[in-house]
Amino acid sequence: MKDTLPVDEKYRIHMTKYFQEYEASIKSTENFWKEKARIIDWFEPFSRVLDDSKKPFYRWFVNGKTNMSYNCLDRYINNEKRNKVAYIWIPEHGEEKVITYFGLYRRVNALAKALLNLGVKKGDGVTIYLPMILEAPIAMLACARIGAVFNVVFSGFGEEALAQRIDDSGSRTIITADGAYRKGKTVHLKKIVDAAIDLSRGVDNVIVVKNTKENIKMESGRDYYYDDIIEDSYVKPEELDSSDPLFILYTSGTTGKPKGIVHGNGGYPVWVANTMKWAFNPGEEDRWWCAADIGWITGHSYIVFAPLLLGVTSIMYEGAIDYPKPDRMWEIVERYGVNMLYTSPTAIRLLMKYGEKYPLMHDLSSLRVLGTVGEPINPAAWHWFYEEIGKSRCPIIDTYWQTETGGFTIAPSMALGMPDLKPGSATFPMPGIMPEILREDGTPAKSGEKGYIVLDRPWPGLMLTVNNDDKRYVDVYFSKYPGKYLMGDYAIKDEDDYYWLLGRSDEVLKVSGHRIGTIEIEDGLVSMKEVAEAAVFGKPDTVKGDTIIAFVTLKEGYEKSSELIDSLKKRMRTELGPIMVPEEIHIVDALPKTRSGKIMRRVIKAVYLNQVTGDVSTLENEASVEEIQRAMDIIRKGTGN
Ligand code: WTA
């Protein structure tokens, strides 16, 4: 057994508890999870911990009945948490709002009642397109309460991206706002929703929160102001099955449309609550700030669900971390006495660029624990965060995970025993997670050798499936190495058994921590009337991780011009959203292709980045060296390099 365990003998001393729990999770999985599932309340107990008879469609806590909204709210309203602050909400400008667990409970019930009155029922899809305002968690919890399957769409996505998600999730109801504030400007969300509905198969209800209070068009019989329809009342939480879907969240892959990742009502809450406890171990008095957006999985799991399941007080911040001034984040830490700050390497690198001056303006002594997520953290950013922000007192919890895993998979554990940290390593697996590093041919990589990271066992936070596409779930995640979950990242396990994540092994980009599929941007570009073909890739960026670079060819009759490039960018912004706009668009005469017609994206990227060295045959499996040389000439000619 020993060689399947992640830690060596020498860590037994200061990580005893971790080691015991980990061992228990692997050796006596059933008992382990039976015990850990008590972190939530069950209306009806589960009859089995894990059903793996239809693997890889694993079903956890079989026949258990529960409800996320009940577990986040109802169980606290008659005890000492009733008046505890759930969220301190900080707007981009203006006064903060404080909401207690009881207050949140009342508001969730009021919206749940409104949804029922509109005819929304268990199993129905609801799209939530909201900025970072309190109505976002309220909407998620109201849907969870009645068993409606919600689909949060990041408010930085445009009309086409929104329409696609409305249709794929089968939503007939949208919860949105008139507008949103972004760095002092107003984004007209309702206009985007109207345009998206026109592109979609249509919806029955649009619920609009008055946020910016701007004038908007309301369609009678379809659009309702939130304030006009909420109704103070009690709505009994639906008794949902563990495997009933809780939400769908779209994420990018390398092929096809974005995948609707489906998480359920049983395994997911058990996983997010336990992982937050293990990794960060928040105390009753702590103030937790996860500075992500609710439109991504980090916001779902660690702004909304895990903190509420654990009864934690959270900061929720509407605005940008460097607006109006570069000290905004530090000002919030000081003013609200934040104890635990969880953010991304991109944010750290951005704030680091502004200089030490800004954190030095504030008293950051309330901080006790720091955390990061979203990308590998480079040692320079790690040291800055550790030294300038944490004053070398606060451990950095580097959490490695993804939308599909529901919660952390590899992270140091405050609760079970901290390993000595190595800057840039996410350290050891959470209990229940069994990572392996494999070579291309599936044999195990040696210590220090780069390979694909896979997880050998199911865990409760694993998604249920890909919405409307069971086949894709199997093909994307369980077929490269049959039976093992493919995370899509490269990693190394070092001589001390620490894991180091090295970035994506596929063509998914990480732009400011946001996961973006090159294919979505290519699809967006080729849907423009002028564009014939497109190839998109990432250029390494010292702050953002990647920036988006596009190469396109034009259809007959269109001429290359800087106006055309600007116009393409503008339309990309409207259709897909500001985060999806390429930084550079290069118009070229031809894009090099393999014999089977595949665009040689990696060759284009290597030429563009000036990374062509020695053996070019490794760049493209399907092409000969001569073809690659010819391809490089085409690109060089096109860009004038
Ligand atoms: C990357 C975000 C290195 C990785 C929670 C993963 C990380 C993808 C880390 C998932 C980390 C996330 N170190 N890489 N600590 N955390 N990643 O679905 O490439 O938006 O596969 O989930 O982010 O992105 P997603």
Image: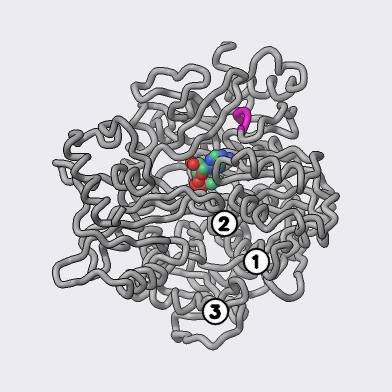
Question: What amino acid type should be assigned to the residue bearing mark 3?
Answer: Asp
Q: Which quarter of the picture shows residue 484? A: top left
Q: Callout 1: helix, strand or loop?
A: loop
Identity of the residue drawn at 79% across and 59% down: 85
Whole-percent x and y of residue 580?
Answer: 42, 61
Q: Which residue, as the protein is rendered here, is positioned at the far front?
A: 641
| Viewer-proximal residue among 572 and 101 | 572
Name the N-terminal-most of marks 2 and 1.
2
- In which quadrant will I find the N terminus? top right
User: In the displayed structure, does residue 264 sit left or right of residue 427?
Assistant: left
| Viewer-proximal residue among 577 and 422 | 422
Identity of the residue drawn at 39% across and 27% down: 483
Q: What residue would you read off at disc 3?
A: 178
Name the N-terminal-most of marks 3 and 2.
2
| Mark 2 beta carbon near ligand 1 (under 8 Å) | no
Distance (Cα) linking label 2 and label 1: 23 Å
Q: What residue would you read off at disc 2?
A: 144
